[in-house]
Image (cartoon, rainbow, N blue to C red):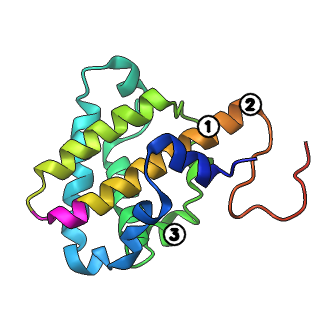
Amino acid sequence: MQSLQEKASEWSGVNPNDAFAIDETNLYQKLGLQTFINLSTNFYNRVYDDEEEWFRSIFANSKKEDAIQNQYEFFVQRMGGPPLYSQRRGHPALIARHRPFPVTRQAAERWLHHMQQALESSTDIDSDSKTKMLNFFRHTAFFLVAGDELKNQKQSIACKHAASKPAAV
C-alpha cells in the first residue's frame, strides 16, 4: 500500500529529494520574513481575484488577511524560520486543516498556477530558491490531494507518521 508521500511523489512528478531540497538551505535566513509576506500576499491577491468561481468559492469563508498570515507563517516555519505558525495555531497538521476544503487535483493545479505566477513575479527570490520552493509546493499540494482522496474513500493509507499497528477501520 502506498504512503501519502509516495502518492504525492507519483502524482506531482516530484521525487522526494527534490521536494525536500528546501531543507538543504535555510530559506528563511536567505530570503527574510518580508519576502514570505510578499509572496503570500501576491499569491492570495491572485487567488481572490481568480476568474474561476469554483476556485474562488473554496476560499469564500476565509478572510484574505488571515489566509495570507497563515500561509506566510507556515512557510517561514517550514523553511527554517521561527515557529510562528505553531505558536499561534498549533501543529500545522496540513491534511486535517485542509479537510473542510475540496482538495482535488484540479484545485491543486489551480493553486499551483497562482503560486508559480507569484514566485515568477517575485524579484526577491533567486532562481534556485524558486525551483526548490515550487518543487516543495507541488509535492505538498498533491500530498493534500492524496489526503483528501483518503478522506473521501474512508480507507486507511499509511503515512510516514503512522504507527506500525494497523489502523482501525
Residue holding disc 2: 153
Position above or below: 46 against 28: above
Badge 2 amino acid = Gln
Could one spot residue 143 in this view of the protein?
A: no
Magenta stretch: includes residue 160:
no
Position above or below: 107 against 157: above
Screen quadrant of the C terminus = top right
Circle 3 — which element?
helix
Q: Which of the two discs, 3 and 1, labels the residue nearer the N terminus?
A: 3
Q: Which residues are magenta?
A: 124-130
Residue holding disc 3: 86
Circle 2 — which element?
helix
Q: Are marks 1 and 2 in contact (CB under 8 Å)?
A: no
Question: Which residue occupies 31% across, 62% down?
Answer: 132
State the mark number for residue 41: none
Instruction: Name, please, the residue furthest toward the left.
Output: 123
Q: Which of the two discs, 1 and 2, labels the residue nearer the N terminus?
A: 1
**10 Å neighbourhood of mark 3: few (<14), some, or many (≥20)?**
some
In this rendering, would 154 be left or right of 93?
right
Taking depth in this image into account, of 141 and 45 the one nearest to the observer is 141
Residue 151, horizontal then vertical, whole percent? 70, 36
Badge 3 amino acid = Ser
Residue holding disc 1: 148
Q: Which of the two discs, 2 and 3, labels the residue nearer the N terminus?
A: 3
Magenta stretch: includes residue 127:
yes
